[in-house]
Image: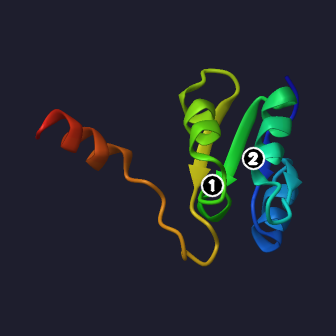
Amino acid sequence: MTTPVYLGDEVSAAGYRLAGLRVHVPAPGTETAALADARADASLVLVSAAVAARIGADALRSALAGIAPLTLIVPDLLGHVPVPDVGARLRRQLGL
């Protein structure tokens, strides 16, 4: 496995690049393929919430459930797309 990868907008990507991550700003319609490519050779994949919203549900679910590489959704810079609240989802499913 290699350097962690960030998939997201250009401005956030600049910051992640400075932090040492490889970055990719996927063109509209290529988000699912970009995720698959990142998962093929990265040790960690960070996906902005905005990009995650445009990835196919099955591909995203599979990536988030996988153990390696760890894939996480991070907030997008402008906050237009909220990050999923996993805790609230689990509480709903458990009836709490």
Query: Are the residues flagged by discs 1 and 2 in contact, CB closer than 8 Å?
Result: no
Q: Report the number of discs.
A: 2
x%, y% of residue 70? 64, 30
Say above or below: 61 vs 79. above
Q: Which residue is mark 1?
A: 52
Q: Nearer the viewer, residue 42 or 18?
A: 42
Question: Residue 66's spot in the image, x, y percent?
Answer: 60, 24
Q: Disc 2 designates what residue?
A: 32
Residue 25 pos. (x, y %): 85, 61
Q: Quadrant of residue 76?
A: bottom right
Instruction: Choose mark 1 or mark 2, whichever is in front.
Output: 2
**Which quadrant would the C terminus be assigned to in this image?**
top left
Query: Which residue is pictured at 66% across the width and 51% down the height?
Result: 55
Side of 5 relative to 44 (left or right) = right
Disc 1 marks a residue whose amino acid type is Ala
Residue at position x 63%, y 33% in the image: 63
Q: Where residue 90 sits in the image (x, y, percent)? A: 28, 38
- Where's the N terminus, which quadrant? top right
The amino acid type, in three-letter code, at marker 2 is Thr
**Residue drawn 68% across the image and 60% down it:** 51
- Characterize the local packing of mark 2: few (<14), some (14-19) or many (20 or more) Cα atoms within 10 angstroms: many
Quarter residue 16 falls in: bottom right
